[in-house]
Amino acid sequence: MKTMMKKGVFFALMVVVAVGLSSCTKVVNEPCQFNKVNVDFHVPQSAWAFDETNSWYSYYYETNKITEYIYDYGSWTMSHEYNPGTKDAFLIQLPEFRFMQDEGTGDFYTQRTDYEVGVGYVIVYVTNSDYAYEPGWKPDEMYFHMQINY
């Protein structure tokens, strides 16, 4: 009988504790804290490489800022920076689509700038909507800004 009573008291106590814990609420108004790292790089016009298989231009940028930990658990945004170092500087987040006009023919096309990230590197791609290779033509020089949060 005493054993049954002990079990009953224990069960009642557990129910009271469970109900008490489940009714607890805590409001957290603290903002999340992240570590932030900025990566800025410049791609000269002469540095763009054309990939004949995929018909795009690319630039490989090596950086030690993208570690395996950041790649697995971090987040990032990549932007094309216009007018860097001036009061008129601004960023456009990638992917970016620019509407262009061929100076020679007057034809309109779209130029897409996008990127790929891996441990230790960033690759920037520029693709024209006509996927045509024009000898001697390369994308303009570009400046990029990447913000990494982890």
Image (spheres, rainbow, N blue to C red):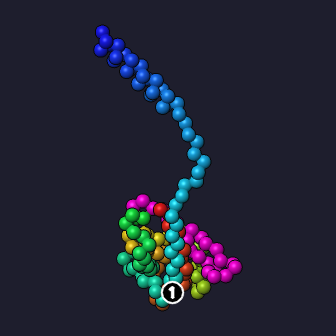
Query: Where 126 sits versus 14, above or below?
Result: below
* Coordinates of residue 29 in the picture (x, y in percent): 60, 48
The reply to whether the magenta stretch includes residue 83 is yes
Q: Residue furthest right?
A: 87
Give the secondary structure at mark 1: loop
Q: Quadrant of residue 90?
A: bottom right
- With 67 as the anchor, is 149 left or right in this view? right
* Coordinates of residue 116 in the picture (x, y in percent): 43, 69
Q: Quadrant of residue 67?
A: bottom left
Q: Quadrant of residue 88?
A: bottom right
- With 68 as the anchor, is 21 left or right in this view? right
Question: Mark 1 = which residue?
Answer: 44
Q: Which residues are magenta?
A: 72-93
Q: Residue furthest front?
A: 2
10 Å crowding of disc 1: few (<14), some (14-19), many (20+): few
Circle 1: residue type: Pro
Residue ID at (37%, 16%)? 8
* On-image quarter of the N terminus: top left
Residue ID at (51%, 86%)? 44
Q: Is residue 139 visible?
A: no
Q: Nearer the viewer, residue 127 or 67?
A: 67
Q: Nearer the viewer, residue 29 or 142?
A: 29
Q: Nearer the viewer, residue 50 or 8?
A: 8
Q: Nearer the viewer, residue 6 or 116?
A: 6
* Coordinates of residue 17 in the picture (x, y in percent): 45, 27
Q: Is residue 148 visible?
A: yes
Report the number of discs. Answer: 1
- With 51 as the anchor, is 143 left or right in this view? right
